[in-house]
Image (cartoon, rainbow, N blue to C red):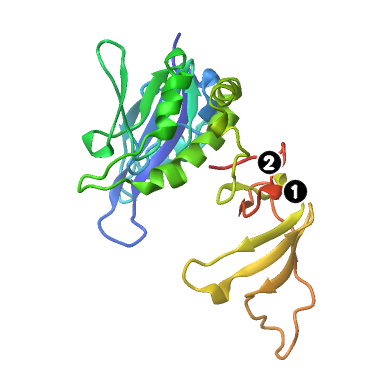
Amino acid sequence: MSKDVINVYLYGGKGLFGGREKPLEASIISCDKYDKCSYYQSGQCLAIRSFGSSGCKFGSTRTEKGYTSRAKKYRKFKDWWESHEQYAKLKHPPTKLGLIDGVVVFPYPHVCIKKEDNGLILLKDPYLGSGTAFIEYDQFTTDLIYRLCTFKPQAMMGGEIKDYQKKTIPLFLAHFKEVLPERYQEFVSTHEEFNNEVDHTGRKAYLKTINPSPVYYKSKSYPQFDEEWYWDGEYLRYKSGHVKSFNITKNYEVEEIKIKPSNESEIKITDNNQVSIYTKFID
């Protein structure tokens, strides 16, 4: 089966913070498994350039070298690729479980998954290797999943990496239920201690897909900038917290502010009650 071009993007040019201009280059990604890829179905692709990404074993990428803005061919090169029907069609996915044509993609940190020549799959501490693991679906067994869920990685200087059990595994289980629901049910039926309500707090979702509910902006360092709004299913309505001043006049009280979000508006889940069967997550 021939590989179809699924995404094109331009890199290079003038830096946001100055410095020497780099010639444009077009990155063209082709794949023959995109129609069997959970990432592609979400408008994403592992092969897209991203800092720290280990890429995808299936997609192929070629690069066409271009020019700086001083060259005569610069505009023609730029316009040609930006007019491509697959230009900027896909984004790099978040750290999330995936399934590509019967192969499970496990991209989470703090664990190194190694497959031995005899087929045995070993779990090792992260400093002994890294990168995204690609595991055949029939090898992604309840036993391996249990080992992943109970693994306690050790740091190079000693001591358990607590974030693996505290953050990575809850996120993995949420993704597991979404991406591989049948295998998830097999797993929790065998290991009932993991058959708990999936905690979605802290995840990003498209605002229009969550239940009507209070939503919040929380500043990591400056609580005076926190905001509380209410999502009524159509509008975000201001409740309390920081708002910018208005220039039209002074000495006023905020009576009502409402915002109509777009389909791309994002929100961070702060309560599981915000989540419904229609909620579409970003991470």
Residue depicted at 43% across the width and 42% down the height? 165
Residue 128 is drawn in which quadrant? top left
In the image, 110 versus 59, the foreground residue is 110
Residue at which label 2 appears: 279
Q: Is residue 64 left or right of residue 268?
A: left
In the image, 94 versus 258, the foreground residue is 94
Q: Residues within 10 Å of mark 1 (few under 14, many from 20)?
A: some
Q: Can residue 200 be spotted in the picture?
A: yes
| Tag 1 and tag 2, C-beta contact below 8 Å | yes
Callout 1 secondary element: loop
Instruction: Give the percent coordinates (x, y) of residue 101.
Output: 49, 16
Callout 2 secondary element: loop
Residue depicted at 70% across the width and 90% down the height? 250
Residue at which label 1 appears: 211
Dot 2 amino acid type: Thr
Residue depicted at 64% across the width and 51% down the height? 265
Instruction: Give the percent coordinates (x, y) of residue 271.
Output: 65, 52
Q: Is residue 75 above or below residue 222?
A: above
Rounded to the nearest whole Å, what is the CA distance between mark 1 and mark 2?
8 Å
Q: Can residue 91 be spotted in the picture?
A: no
Instruction: Give the percent coordinates (x, y) of residue 167.
Output: 46, 46
